[in-house]
Amino acid sequence: MATEAHNDEIVVAVVGVTGSGKSSFIKRVTGNESIEIGHDLRSKTAEVQAYPLQIMGKCYTLIDTPGFDDGERTDEDIFASLADWLRRSYNKGQRLNALLYLHGIIANREKGSDLRNLKVFKKLCGAENYGRIVLGITWWDQVDPQTALARETMLAETPEFWGDMVQKGSRIERIPHDKAQCMQLLHSLVQNQRTTLRIQHEMAEGKEALRTTAAMEMEQYKAIDAIKDAEEGERRAQEIAYQLKNKAIEQWASERRLEQHRRHQELQMQQMSQIADLETIRARMSESEPSRRSPRPEASDRTRRIEELAAALQQARLRTQPPSYTADDRLERMSIMARTNMHEGKIRAADQQLNELAGNTKQGWDSILDPTKEGDYPLWNAFCDRCLRQASVKGYWSQ
């Protein structure tokens, strides 16, 4: 609850994100045990609260404000609550002597929301009031000194964070845990003149809280967040669509693999069946092989007949000695030709003449060998092509 303005009152607004230690600092300084301290992302300060105290005979009023990045309330709702208190306090004639902006050094990096809220805070105060801002670092003892010093240097030298504020009069203080040291820090603000924040000027000129510079800055970040959320939603939708597509492709590929496996099994079965059929054919061919290899009766009889004929010719030559060398030579040539010639007609003719020779006497041989005798003798004609002359020519046998 806001107090009425007094000429000697020193009003200090304690601001910062949720969890930066605002309520802890006020409770330590005022000794008010009713102040609740949050230990998570939910702020225990739902509305702007004023806590009066005296330090070395001076009246102080500490304004505890709800922090941004609350787990239960939106930043727009918190901003509207803070703007409403600033408007009412301005109408009552209450002005701020200083603003204590607390920041926890335990964060290993600055979040995007921290930077956004800091920019909104700068717009709310105005650059002309940077000299009345104390940048307090909390939880210093919970971080390694070298690490804490490096983070402090980064905040102080980076214009996007505290660098531009420090250049225009803001000072950095490490918030102690000792009550006396905290009260001494507040006492150092006595010399600060009262000031009117930029948002108070704008609302006094008739602007609505949501049309002020700070509100427009927050609205801009809200639009950016909406765009980012939309892009994130679209990206997520694309990822889901891609996953569904991949799932469909994987399902199709799986079905394809199963089909190929089934087809491969069918081909293997067909191949095994063909192999079995081939083995059956081979077995049947093996069974019929002896009968196929056995000689035909006709061929066997012919061979046997030729052998018998050759033997008969030889025996006839031995039994009937021809009277002269020329007749014996002709019989030898006939025997050789009979063994080599397979023509059945010649074999029968030779056989017939052998029968005649077997029954003839020496006179019979002389008559047969007489070239002057009329008639054609195929036995001799069969060998005339290998002689010097025809057997029927007169004078051949006298040579």
Image (cartoon, rainbow, N blue to C red):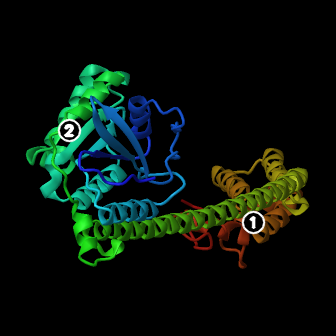
Residue shown at 35% from the left, 73% from the top: 210
Determine which residue is flagged by label 1. 368
Side of 242 where 268 appears, left or right:
right
What secondary structure is found at the residue carrying circle 2?
A: loop
Q: Is residue 343 above or below residue 276?
A: below
Q: Amino acid at mark 2?
A: Leu
Q: Position of residue 348 (x, y in %)?
A: 82, 67
Checking the image for residue 189, the label placed there is 2
Residue 294 is at least partly visible in this image: no
Query: Residue 385: which quarter of the image?
Result: bottom right
Q: Which of pointers 2 and 1 lies earlier in the amino acid sequence?
A: 2
Q: Position of residue 163 (x, y in %)?
A: 14, 45
Residue 276 is at least partly visible in this image: yes
Residue shown at 31% from the left, 54% from the top: 5
Q: Is residue 93 above or below residue 103?
A: below
Q: Nearer the viewer, residue 212 or 74?
A: 212
Residue shown at 39% from the left, 65% from the top: 84
- The image quadrant where one finds the C terminus is bottom right
Q: Amino acid at mark 1?
A: Ile
Q: Residues under labels 2 and 1: Cα distance?
A: 171 Å
